[in-house]
Protein backbone atom coordinates (compact mmCIF):
# COMPACT_ATOMS: atom_id res chain seq x y z
CA UNK A 1 0.00 0.00 0.00
CA UNK A 2 1.19 3.49 -0.82
CA UNK A 3 1.52 5.13 2.60
CA UNK A 4 -1.53 4.45 4.71
CA UNK A 5 -4.13 4.26 1.93
CA UNK A 6 -4.80 2.07 -1.06
CA UNK A 7 -4.01 3.30 -4.56
CA UNK A 8 -6.78 2.96 -7.18
CA UNK A 9 -4.67 0.26 -8.88
CA UNK A 10 -4.47 -1.76 -5.66
CA UNK A 11 -8.22 -1.39 -5.16
CA UNK A 12 -8.78 -2.71 -8.70
CA UNK A 13 -6.38 -5.63 -8.16
CA UNK A 14 -8.10 -6.46 -4.88
CA UNK A 15 -11.59 -6.23 -6.39
CA UNK A 16 -10.79 -8.46 -9.31
CA UNK A 17 -9.13 -10.95 -6.97
CA UNK A 18 -5.70 -10.97 -8.57
CA UNK A 19 -3.67 -10.21 -5.45
CA UNK A 20 -1.77 -12.85 -3.52
CA UNK A 21 -3.96 -14.15 -0.65
CA UNK A 22 -1.72 -12.67 2.07
CA UNK A 23 -1.88 -9.15 0.67
CA UNK A 24 -5.60 -9.52 -0.02
CA UNK A 25 -6.13 -10.38 3.68
CA UNK A 26 -4.18 -7.30 4.78
CA UNK A 27 -6.31 -5.10 2.53
CA UNK A 28 -9.51 -6.78 3.72
CA UNK A 29 -8.54 -5.90 7.30
CA UNK A 30 -7.55 -2.38 6.32
CA UNK A 31 -10.80 -1.48 4.57
CA UNK A 32 -12.79 -2.52 7.62
CA UNK A 33 -11.26 0.42 9.47
CA UNK A 34 -10.67 2.90 6.65
CA UNK A 35 -13.82 4.44 5.07
CA UNK A 36 -12.01 6.19 2.15
CA UNK A 37 -10.29 2.95 1.10
CA UNK A 38 -13.51 0.99 1.62
CA UNK A 39 -15.31 3.35 -0.74
CA UNK A 40 -12.51 2.97 -3.30
CA UNK A 41 -12.73 -0.81 -3.09
CA UNK A 42 -16.52 -0.84 -3.41
CA UNK A 43 -16.29 1.28 -6.53
CA UNK A 44 -13.73 -1.17 -7.94
CA UNK A 45 -15.91 -4.14 -6.93
CA UNK A 46 -18.77 -2.58 -8.86
CA UNK A 47 -16.64 -2.59 -12.01
CA UNK A 48 -15.28 -6.08 -11.34
CA UNK A 49 -18.77 -7.46 -10.74
CA UNK A 50 -19.79 -6.16 -14.14
CA UNK A 51 -17.43 -8.76 -15.62
CA UNK A 52 -19.80 -11.46 -14.42
CA UNK A 53 -22.49 -9.95 -16.60
CA UNK A 54 -20.44 -10.81 -19.67
CA UNK A 55 -21.13 -14.49 -19.04
CA UNK A 56 -23.66 -15.96 -21.49
CA UNK A 57 -26.71 -16.92 -19.46
CA UNK A 58 -27.46 -20.61 -19.03
CA UNK A 59 -30.74 -21.93 -17.83
CA UNK A 60 -30.35 -23.08 -14.23
CA UNK A 61 -31.38 -26.71 -13.56
CA UNK A 62 -35.14 -27.01 -13.07
CA UNK A 63 -34.88 -28.78 -9.70
CA UNK A 64 -32.53 -26.22 -8.22
CA UNK A 65 -35.20 -23.87 -6.89
CA UNK A 66 -36.91 -26.63 -4.98
CA UNK A 67 -33.59 -27.74 -3.50
CA UNK A 68 -32.85 -24.17 -2.43
CA UNK A 69 -36.29 -23.76 -0.88
CA UNK A 70 -36.01 -27.07 0.98
CA UNK A 71 -32.50 -26.29 2.19
CA UNK A 72 -33.58 -22.83 3.30
CA UNK A 73 -36.42 -24.41 5.25
CA UNK A 74 -39.14 -22.80 3.10
CA UNK A 75 -40.52 -26.03 1.63
CA UNK A 76 -40.83 -29.65 2.65
CA UNK A 77 -38.78 -32.04 0.55
CA UNK A 78 -40.64 -32.93 -2.65
CA UNK A 79 -39.67 -36.54 -2.22
CA UNK A 80 -42.61 -37.13 0.14
CA UNK A 81 -45.05 -35.71 -2.35
CA UNK A 82 -43.68 -37.97 -5.03
CA UNK A 83 -44.14 -40.97 -2.75
CA UNK A 84 -47.94 -40.43 -2.79
CA UNK A 85 -48.03 -41.20 -6.50
CA UNK A 86 -46.27 -44.52 -6.28
CA UNK A 87 -48.52 -47.26 -7.66
CA UNK A 88 -50.02 -50.10 -5.59
CA UNK A 89 -47.82 -52.84 -6.96
CA UNK A 90 -45.80 -54.14 -4.04
CA UNK A 91 -42.76 -54.98 -6.08
CA UNK A 92 -42.85 -51.59 -7.66
CA UNK A 93 -43.24 -49.91 -4.29
CA UNK A 94 -40.35 -51.87 -2.88
CA UNK A 95 -38.14 -51.08 -5.83
CA UNK A 96 -39.07 -47.43 -5.80
CA UNK A 97 -38.70 -47.28 -2.01
CA UNK A 98 -35.23 -48.72 -2.21
CA UNK A 99 -34.36 -46.33 -4.98
CA UNK A 100 -35.82 -43.40 -3.07
CA UNK A 101 -33.95 -44.37 0.07
CA UNK A 102 -30.75 -44.55 -1.90
CA UNK A 103 -31.53 -41.22 -3.52
CA UNK A 104 -32.48 -39.66 -0.21
CA UNK A 105 -29.28 -40.99 1.26
CA UNK A 106 -27.31 -39.50 -1.60
CA UNK A 107 -29.11 -36.18 -1.34
CA UNK A 108 -28.63 -36.22 2.41
CA UNK A 109 -24.98 -37.14 1.99
CA UNK A 110 -24.50 -34.43 -0.56
CA UNK A 111 -26.17 -31.98 1.80
CA UNK A 112 -23.86 -33.04 4.60
CA UNK A 113 -20.84 -32.72 2.36
CA UNK A 114 -21.97 -29.23 1.39
CA UNK A 115 -22.51 -28.32 5.02
CA UNK A 116 -19.06 -29.60 5.90
CA UNK A 117 -17.56 -27.76 2.97
CA UNK A 118 -19.22 -24.53 4.06
CA UNK A 119 -18.15 -25.02 7.65
CA UNK A 120 -14.62 -25.69 6.45
CA UNK A 121 -14.72 -22.52 4.38
CA UNK A 122 -15.97 -20.50 7.37
CA UNK A 123 -13.30 -22.03 9.56
CA UNK A 124 -10.59 -21.20 7.04
CA UNK A 125 -11.81 -17.62 6.91
CA UNK A 126 -11.72 -17.41 10.71
CA UNK A 127 -8.23 -18.89 10.82
CA UNK A 128 -7.06 -16.42 8.17
CA UNK A 129 -8.51 -13.53 10.13
CA UNK A 130 -6.95 -14.78 13.35
CA UNK A 131 -3.58 -15.23 11.63
CA UNK A 132 -3.71 -11.74 10.17
CA UNK A 133 -4.57 -10.28 13.59
CA UNK A 134 -1.82 -12.29 15.20
CA UNK A 135 0.70 -11.04 12.63
CA UNK A 136 -0.41 -7.49 13.24
CA UNK A 137 -0.10 -7.90 17.02
CA UNK A 138 3.36 -9.44 16.59
CA UNK A 139 4.37 -6.43 14.51
CA UNK A 140 3.08 -4.02 17.14
CA UNK A 141 4.90 -5.96 19.90
CA UNK A 142 8.11 -5.83 17.89
CA UNK A 143 7.81 -2.08 17.40
CA UNK A 144 7.03 -1.67 21.10
CA UNK A 145 10.11 -3.68 22.07
CA UNK A 146 12.26 -1.57 19.74
CA UNK A 147 10.80 1.62 21.23
CA UNK A 148 11.48 0.33 24.77
CA UNK A 149 15.08 -0.52 23.82
CA UNK A 150 15.56 2.98 22.40
CA UNK A 151 14.08 4.48 25.57
CA UNK A 152 16.42 2.39 27.73
CA UNK A 153 19.39 3.44 25.59
CA UNK A 154 18.42 7.11 25.83
CA UNK A 155 17.98 6.73 29.61
CA UNK A 156 21.44 5.21 29.99
CA UNK A 157 22.89 7.94 27.81
CA UNK A 158 21.21 10.56 30.00
CA UNK A 159 22.73 9.03 33.14
CA UNK A 160 26.17 8.95 31.50
CA UNK A 161 25.77 12.61 30.42
CA UNK A 162 24.84 13.61 33.97
CA UNK A 163 27.83 11.79 35.45
CA UNK A 164 30.17 13.44 32.96
CA UNK A 165 28.65 16.84 33.68
CA UNK A 166 29.04 16.33 37.46
CA UNK A 167 32.66 15.28 36.97
CA UNK A 168 33.36 18.40 34.89
CA UNK A 169 31.66 20.72 37.38
CA UNK A 170 33.22 19.25 40.50
CA UNK A 171 36.14 21.32 41.90
CA UNK A 172 37.76 18.09 43.01
CA UNK A 173 37.97 16.67 39.50
CA UNK A 174 41.26 16.80 37.62
CA UNK A 175 41.49 17.29 33.87
CA UNK A 176 44.42 16.11 31.76
CA UNK A 177 44.89 17.37 28.25
CA UNK A 178 45.22 14.66 25.69
CA UNK A 179 47.56 15.08 22.72
CA UNK A 180 46.76 13.59 19.37
CA UNK A 181 49.57 11.82 17.63
CA UNK A 182 50.58 12.56 14.09
CA UNK A 183 48.19 9.97 12.53
CA UNK A 184 45.06 11.86 13.67
CA UNK A 185 46.15 15.45 14.12
CA UNK A 186 42.64 16.91 13.96
CA UNK A 187 41.41 14.78 16.86
CA UNK A 188 40.97 16.48 20.25
CA UNK A 189 40.36 14.90 23.64
CA UNK A 190 40.25 15.29 27.42
CA UNK A 191 40.77 12.85 30.27
CA UNK A 192 38.86 13.73 33.44
CA UNK A 193 39.35 11.97 36.75
CA UNK A 194 36.55 12.20 39.28
CA UNK A 195 37.76 10.99 42.68
CA UNK A 196 34.18 11.26 44.02
CA UNK A 197 32.85 8.85 41.41
CA UNK A 198 36.12 6.87 41.28
CA UNK A 199 35.66 7.13 37.53
CA UNK A 200 37.87 8.26 34.70
CA UNK A 201 36.12 9.89 31.71
CA UNK A 202 37.64 10.09 28.27
CA UNK A 203 36.01 12.39 25.70
CA UNK A 204 37.27 12.86 22.15
CA UNK A 205 36.09 14.42 18.92
CA UNK A 206 37.17 14.36 15.27
CA UNK A 207 38.28 10.75 15.57
CA UNK A 208 38.81 9.05 12.26
CA UNK A 209 36.47 6.21 11.27
CA UNK A 210 37.80 2.71 11.83
CA UNK A 211 36.86 -0.59 10.18
CA UNK A 212 34.79 -3.17 12.07
CA UNK A 213 37.90 -5.27 12.59
CA UNK A 214 39.51 -2.60 14.82
CA UNK A 215 38.73 -0.69 18.00
CA UNK A 216 40.17 2.11 20.09
CA UNK A 217 41.60 1.00 23.46
CA UNK A 218 42.44 3.18 26.49
CA UNK A 219 45.50 2.29 28.53
CA UNK A 220 47.18 3.71 31.66
CA UNK A 221 50.79 2.96 32.55
CA UNK A 222 52.80 2.84 35.71
CA UNK A 223 56.56 2.59 35.28
CA UNK A 224 56.15 1.30 31.74
CA UNK A 225 53.56 -1.34 32.67
CA UNK A 226 50.32 -0.77 30.74
CA UNK A 227 46.88 -1.70 32.06
CA UNK A 228 43.77 -1.62 29.86
CA UNK A 229 40.80 0.50 30.95
CA UNK A 230 38.63 -0.80 28.04
CA UNK A 231 37.73 -0.25 24.43
CA UNK A 232 35.42 2.16 22.64
CA UNK A 233 34.29 3.19 19.15
CA UNK A 234 33.42 6.70 17.93
CA UNK A 235 30.00 7.47 16.46
CA UNK A 236 29.49 8.42 12.81
CA UNK A 237 30.47 12.05 13.52
CA UNK A 238 33.80 11.02 15.10
CA UNK A 239 32.70 11.72 18.68
CA UNK A 240 33.51 9.25 21.46
CA UNK A 241 32.85 9.21 25.17
CA UNK A 242 34.11 6.51 27.43
CA UNK A 243 34.16 6.03 31.18
CA UNK A 244 35.69 3.40 33.41
CA UNK A 245 35.59 2.88 37.15
CA UNK A 246 39.04 2.83 38.80
CA UNK A 247 38.53 1.76 42.43
CA UNK A 248 42.18 2.17 43.33
CA UNK A 249 42.38 5.72 41.97
CA UNK A 250 44.63 7.24 39.32
CA UNK A 251 47.52 8.72 41.31
CA UNK A 252 49.76 5.73 40.74
CA UNK A 253 49.74 6.13 36.97
CA UNK A 254 51.98 8.44 34.99
CA UNK A 255 50.71 8.15 31.42
CA UNK A 256 47.51 7.32 29.51
CA UNK A 257 47.40 6.36 25.83
CA UNK A 258 44.73 5.44 23.33
CA UNK A 259 45.79 2.87 20.76
CA UNK A 260 44.23 1.24 17.74
CA UNK A 261 43.80 -2.48 18.44
CA UNK A 262 42.02 -5.46 16.89
CA UNK A 263 38.25 -5.60 17.51
CA UNK A 264 37.47 -6.90 21.00
CA UNK A 265 40.62 -5.31 22.46
CA UNK A 266 44.13 -6.57 23.10
CA UNK A 267 45.49 -8.05 26.32
CA UNK A 268 48.74 -6.14 25.80
CA UNK A 269 49.28 -2.83 24.09
CA UNK A 270 50.36 -3.55 20.51
CA UNK A 271 48.79 -1.09 18.06
CA UNK A 272 49.78 2.46 17.12
CA UNK A 273 48.92 5.20 19.62
CA UNK A 274 46.33 7.82 18.70
CA UNK A 275 46.31 9.89 21.91
CA UNK A 276 48.70 10.31 24.80
CA UNK A 277 48.14 12.12 28.13
CA UNK A 278 50.47 13.13 30.95
CA UNK A 279 48.82 12.10 34.24
CA UNK A 280 51.27 13.90 36.53
CA UNK A 281 48.52 16.39 37.38
CA UNK A 282 46.63 13.47 38.99
CA UNK A 283 49.36 13.09 41.66
CA UNK A 284 48.18 15.89 43.96
CA UNK A 285 46.83 13.68 46.65
CA UNK A 286 43.67 12.82 44.75
CA UNK A 287 44.59 9.26 43.98
CA UNK A 288 44.51 6.12 45.97
CA UNK B 1 -43.37 3.23 8.88
CA UNK B 2 -45.84 1.54 6.57
CA UNK B 3 -44.74 -0.61 3.70
CA UNK B 4 -45.80 1.16 0.48
CA UNK B 5 -45.63 -1.31 -2.35
CA UNK B 6 -42.31 -0.49 -3.94
CA UNK B 7 -40.79 2.03 -1.54
CA UNK B 8 -37.82 3.99 -2.70
CA UNK B 9 -35.58 2.59 0.01
CA UNK B 10 -31.89 2.77 -0.77
CA UNK B 11 -31.33 -0.55 0.98
CA UNK B 12 -31.06 -2.24 4.32
CA UNK B 13 -29.24 -0.06 6.77
CA UNK B 14 -29.54 -2.52 9.56
CA UNK B 15 -31.33 -5.75 10.29
CA UNK B 16 -33.12 -4.02 13.17
CA UNK B 17 -34.54 -1.44 10.82
CA UNK B 18 -35.76 -4.20 8.54
CA UNK B 19 -37.46 -5.91 11.45
CA UNK B 20 -39.50 -2.81 12.22
CA UNK B 21 -41.18 -2.81 8.82
CA UNK B 22 -44.70 -4.04 8.60
CA UNK B 23 -46.31 -5.96 5.74
CA UNK B 24 -48.03 -4.02 2.95
CA UNK B 25 -51.15 -2.20 4.08
CA UNK B 26 -51.95 -0.25 0.92
CA UNK B 27 -54.90 -1.44 -1.09
CA UNK B 28 -52.97 -2.10 -4.28
CA UNK B 29 -49.30 -2.52 -3.63
CA UNK B 30 -47.00 -2.91 -6.57
CA UNK B 31 -46.20 -6.53 -7.36
CA UNK B 32 -42.97 -7.68 -5.82
CA UNK B 33 -41.53 -8.41 -9.24
CA UNK B 34 -41.41 -4.63 -9.69
CA UNK B 35 -39.48 -4.04 -6.51
CA UNK B 36 -35.83 -3.08 -6.62
CA UNK B 37 -33.22 -5.58 -5.50
CA UNK B 38 -32.54 -3.54 -2.39
CA UNK B 39 -36.22 -3.43 -1.47
CA UNK B 40 -36.50 -7.17 -1.95
CA UNK B 41 -33.52 -7.65 0.37
CA UNK B 42 -35.23 -5.46 2.93
CA UNK B 43 -38.28 -7.70 2.72
CA UNK B 44 -36.14 -10.83 2.88
CA UNK B 45 -34.56 -9.53 6.06
CA UNK B 46 -38.12 -9.29 7.38
CA UNK B 47 -38.50 -13.00 6.36
CA UNK B 48 -40.68 -12.42 3.28
CA UNK B 49 -40.57 -15.72 1.41
CA UNK B 50 -42.18 -14.32 -1.74
CA UNK B 51 -39.51 -11.63 -1.95
CA UNK B 52 -36.87 -14.34 -1.71
CA UNK B 53 -38.54 -16.30 -4.49
CA UNK B 54 -38.66 -13.20 -6.71
CA UNK B 55 -35.01 -12.39 -6.09
CA UNK B 56 -34.07 -16.01 -6.72
CA UNK B 57 -35.88 -16.05 -10.06
CA UNK B 58 -34.32 -12.75 -11.02
CA UNK B 59 -30.71 -13.82 -10.53
CA UNK B 60 -30.47 -17.60 -10.41
CA UNK B 61 -29.50 -17.94 -14.06
CA UNK B 62 -26.79 -15.30 -13.73
CA UNK B 63 -25.39 -16.84 -10.55
CA UNK B 64 -25.53 -20.36 -11.94
CA UNK B 65 -23.98 -19.30 -15.26
CA UNK B 66 -21.12 -17.50 -13.53
CA UNK B 67 -20.40 -20.41 -11.21
CA UNK B 68 -20.68 -22.91 -14.09
CA UNK B 69 -18.29 -20.83 -16.17
CA UNK B 70 -15.78 -20.76 -13.33
CA UNK B 71 -16.08 -24.42 -12.37
CA UNK B 72 -15.99 -25.87 -15.88
CA UNK B 73 -17.64 -29.14 -16.74
CA UNK B 74 -18.69 -30.12 -13.22
CA UNK B 75 -22.30 -28.94 -13.48
CA UNK B 76 -23.36 -30.79 -10.30
CA UNK B 77 -20.79 -28.82 -8.34
CA UNK B 78 -21.96 -25.58 -9.95
CA UNK B 79 -25.50 -26.44 -8.88
CA UNK B 80 -24.37 -27.12 -5.31
CA UNK B 81 -22.50 -23.84 -5.12
CA UNK B 82 -25.39 -21.82 -6.57
CA UNK B 83 -27.74 -23.50 -4.09
CA UNK B 84 -25.46 -22.64 -1.21
CA UNK B 85 -25.24 -18.99 -2.29
CA UNK B 86 -29.01 -18.55 -2.30
CA UNK B 87 -29.56 -20.49 0.92
CA UNK B 88 -27.03 -18.23 2.66
CA UNK B 89 -28.70 -15.18 1.14
CA UNK B 90 -31.93 -16.26 2.84
CA UNK B 91 -30.24 -17.21 6.10
CA UNK B 92 -27.91 -14.19 6.35
CA UNK B 93 -29.51 -11.25 4.47
CA UNK B 94 -27.88 -8.78 6.85
CA UNK B 95 -24.49 -9.44 5.25
CA UNK B 96 -25.66 -7.16 2.44
CA UNK B 97 -25.37 -3.49 3.40
CA UNK B 98 -26.90 -1.24 0.77
CA UNK B 99 -24.77 1.76 1.70
CA UNK B 100 -21.68 -0.12 0.63
CA UNK B 101 -22.77 -0.66 -2.96
CA UNK B 102 -25.28 -2.16 -5.37
CA UNK B 103 -26.94 -5.46 -4.58
CA UNK B 104 -25.91 -6.95 -7.91
CA UNK B 105 -22.23 -6.11 -7.27
CA UNK B 106 -22.45 -7.66 -3.83
CA UNK B 107 -24.19 -10.79 -5.12
CA UNK B 108 -21.64 -11.30 -7.89
CA UNK B 109 -18.80 -10.69 -5.44
CA UNK B 110 -20.24 -13.35 -3.10
CA UNK B 111 -20.74 -15.69 -6.07
CA UNK B 112 -17.21 -15.26 -7.34
CA UNK B 113 -15.62 -15.64 -3.92
CA UNK B 114 -17.53 -18.85 -3.25
CA UNK B 115 -16.57 -20.30 -6.64
CA UNK B 116 -12.93 -19.27 -6.15
CA UNK B 117 -12.92 -21.08 -2.81
CA UNK B 118 -13.99 -24.23 -4.67
CA UNK B 119 -11.39 -23.71 -7.39
CA UNK B 120 -8.57 -23.19 -4.91
CA UNK B 121 -9.59 -26.08 -2.68
CA UNK B 122 -9.48 -28.45 -5.66
CA UNK B 123 -6.07 -27.45 -7.01
CA UNK B 124 -4.57 -26.94 -10.43
CA UNK B 125 -4.80 -30.51 -11.58
CA UNK B 126 -8.57 -30.54 -11.12
CA UNK B 127 -8.79 -27.23 -12.97
CA UNK B 128 -6.93 -28.68 -15.96
CA UNK B 129 -8.99 -31.85 -15.97
CA UNK B 130 -12.35 -30.07 -15.76
CA UNK B 131 -11.42 -27.14 -17.98
CA UNK B 132 -12.44 -24.74 -15.25
CA UNK B 133 -11.06 -21.31 -14.71
CA UNK B 134 -11.80 -19.27 -17.80
CA UNK B 135 -14.87 -20.91 -19.25
CA UNK B 136 -16.36 -20.86 -22.70
CA UNK B 137 -17.34 -17.55 -24.20
CA UNK B 138 -19.99 -18.95 -26.50
CA UNK B 139 -23.58 -19.07 -25.31
CA UNK B 140 -24.89 -22.44 -24.17
CA UNK B 141 -28.62 -22.99 -23.63
CA UNK B 142 -29.09 -19.27 -23.43
CA UNK B 143 -32.18 -18.06 -21.62
CA UNK B 144 -34.62 -16.57 -24.12
CA UNK B 145 -35.11 -12.84 -23.58
CA UNK B 146 -38.90 -13.05 -23.55
CA UNK B 147 -39.07 -15.92 -21.07
CA UNK B 148 -39.14 -14.01 -17.84
CA UNK B 149 -41.69 -13.53 -15.07
CA UNK B 150 -39.88 -10.37 -14.08
CA UNK B 151 -39.75 -8.42 -17.38
CA UNK B 152 -38.57 -5.04 -16.06
CA UNK B 153 -35.64 -6.36 -14.03
CA UNK B 154 -34.80 -8.82 -16.79
CA UNK B 155 -34.76 -6.04 -19.37
CA UNK B 156 -32.47 -3.94 -17.16
CA UNK B 157 -30.16 -6.88 -16.64
CA UNK B 158 -30.06 -7.61 -20.36
CA UNK B 159 -29.26 -3.97 -21.12
CA UNK B 160 -26.46 -4.01 -18.58
CA UNK B 161 -25.13 -7.26 -20.02
CA UNK B 162 -25.16 -5.72 -23.49
CA UNK B 163 -23.15 -2.73 -22.25
CA UNK B 164 -20.61 -4.92 -20.45
CA UNK B 165 -20.13 -7.24 -23.40
CA UNK B 166 -19.68 -4.27 -25.74
CA UNK B 167 -17.14 -2.76 -23.34
CA UNK B 168 -15.26 -6.05 -23.12
CA UNK B 169 -15.30 -6.47 -26.89
CA UNK B 170 -13.60 -3.09 -27.20
CA UNK B 171 -10.75 -4.16 -24.92
CA UNK B 172 -7.55 -5.51 -26.50
CA UNK B 173 -7.61 -9.32 -26.38
CA UNK B 174 -4.64 -9.60 -23.99
CA UNK B 175 -6.29 -7.25 -21.47
CA UNK B 176 -9.57 -9.12 -21.72
CA UNK B 177 -7.79 -12.44 -21.17
CA UNK B 178 -5.93 -11.14 -18.11
CA UNK B 179 -9.20 -9.87 -16.60
CA UNK B 180 -10.99 -13.16 -17.34
CA UNK B 181 -8.21 -15.28 -15.85
CA UNK B 182 -8.22 -13.17 -12.69
CA UNK B 183 -11.98 -12.89 -12.28
CA UNK B 184 -13.28 -16.19 -13.63
CA UNK B 185 -10.12 -18.26 -13.22
CA UNK B 186 -9.44 -17.13 -9.66
CA UNK B 187 -5.76 -16.76 -10.57
CA UNK B 188 -3.44 -14.31 -8.88
CA UNK B 189 -1.22 -12.03 -10.95
CA UNK B 190 1.74 -14.34 -10.41
CA UNK B 191 -0.28 -17.33 -11.58
CA UNK B 192 -1.53 -15.42 -14.62
CA UNK B 193 2.05 -14.44 -15.49
CA UNK B 194 3.05 -18.11 -15.28
CA UNK B 195 0.03 -19.21 -17.31
CA UNK B 196 0.64 -16.69 -20.08
CA UNK B 197 4.46 -16.84 -19.92
CA UNK B 198 4.52 -13.09 -19.51
CA UNK B 199 6.38 -10.86 -17.02
CA UNK B 200 4.45 -9.97 -13.87
CA UNK B 201 4.67 -6.26 -14.73
CA UNK B 202 2.99 -6.87 -18.07
CA UNK B 203 0.12 -8.73 -16.39
CA UNK B 204 -0.34 -5.95 -13.82
CA UNK B 205 -0.42 -3.35 -16.58
CA UNK B 206 -3.00 -5.31 -18.59
CA UNK B 207 -5.26 -5.67 -15.56
CA UNK B 208 -4.87 -2.02 -14.64
CA UNK B 209 -5.62 -0.78 -18.17
CA UNK B 210 -8.46 -3.26 -18.60
CA UNK B 211 -10.17 -2.15 -15.40
CA UNK B 212 -9.62 1.50 -16.30
CA UNK B 213 -11.25 1.12 -19.72
CA UNK B 214 -14.07 -0.97 -18.32
CA UNK B 215 -14.75 1.66 -15.67
CA UNK B 216 -14.91 4.41 -18.29
CA UNK B 217 -17.14 2.37 -20.57
CA UNK B 218 -19.57 1.57 -17.77
CA UNK B 219 -19.61 5.04 -16.26
CA UNK B 220 -22.92 5.96 -17.88
CA UNK B 221 -24.78 2.72 -17.29
CA UNK B 222 -28.17 2.73 -15.65
Image (cartoon, helix red, strand yellow):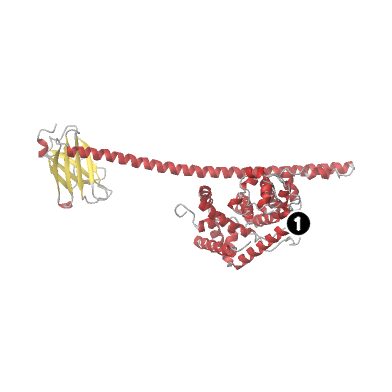
User: Splitting the image into 4 quarters, where does residue A141 fall?
Assistant: top left
In this view, the residue farthest toward the right is A89
Tell which of A130 and A9 is nearer to you. Answer: A9
Tell which of B46 and A274 is nearer to you. Answer: B46
Is B121 above or below relative to A9?
above
Q: Examine the rendering and report whether any part of residue B81 can be seen.
A: no
Tell which of B156 and A188 is nearer to you. Answer: B156
Q: Quadrant of the C terminus of chain A?
A: top left
Q: Examine the rendering and report whether any part of residue A31 can be seen.
A: yes
Mark 1, Cα crowd under 10 Å, few <14 / some 14-19 / many 20+, is few
User: Splitting the image into 4 quarters, where does residue A219 fall?
Assistant: top left
Residue drawn 67% across and 49% down? B41
| Side of A207 relative to B45 (left or right) | left
Position of residue B165 measured from the top left corner of the image (x, y, whole percent): 64, 64
State how many labels appear: 1
Tell which of B81 and A42 is nearer to you. Answer: A42
Residue where numbered disc 1 is placed:
B149
Position of residue B187 measured from the top left corner of the image (x, y, whole percent): 57, 56
Which chain is mark 1 on?
B
Amino acid sequence: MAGEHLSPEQADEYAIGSLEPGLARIIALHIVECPPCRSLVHDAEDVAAALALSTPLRRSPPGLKQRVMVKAGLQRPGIFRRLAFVGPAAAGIAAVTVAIMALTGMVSLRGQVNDLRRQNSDLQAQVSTALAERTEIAGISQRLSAAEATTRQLGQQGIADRELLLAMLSPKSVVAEVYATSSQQNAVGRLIWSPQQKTVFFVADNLGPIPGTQTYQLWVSENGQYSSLGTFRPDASGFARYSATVPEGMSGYDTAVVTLEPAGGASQRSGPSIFAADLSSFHSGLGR
Amino acid sequence: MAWQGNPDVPGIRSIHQAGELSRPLAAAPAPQTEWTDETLMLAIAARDEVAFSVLYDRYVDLVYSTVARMLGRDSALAEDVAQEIFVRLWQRPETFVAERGRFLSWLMSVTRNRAVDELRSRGRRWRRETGSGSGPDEPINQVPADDADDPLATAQLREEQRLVRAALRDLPADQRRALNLAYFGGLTQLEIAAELHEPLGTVKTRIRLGMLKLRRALADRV
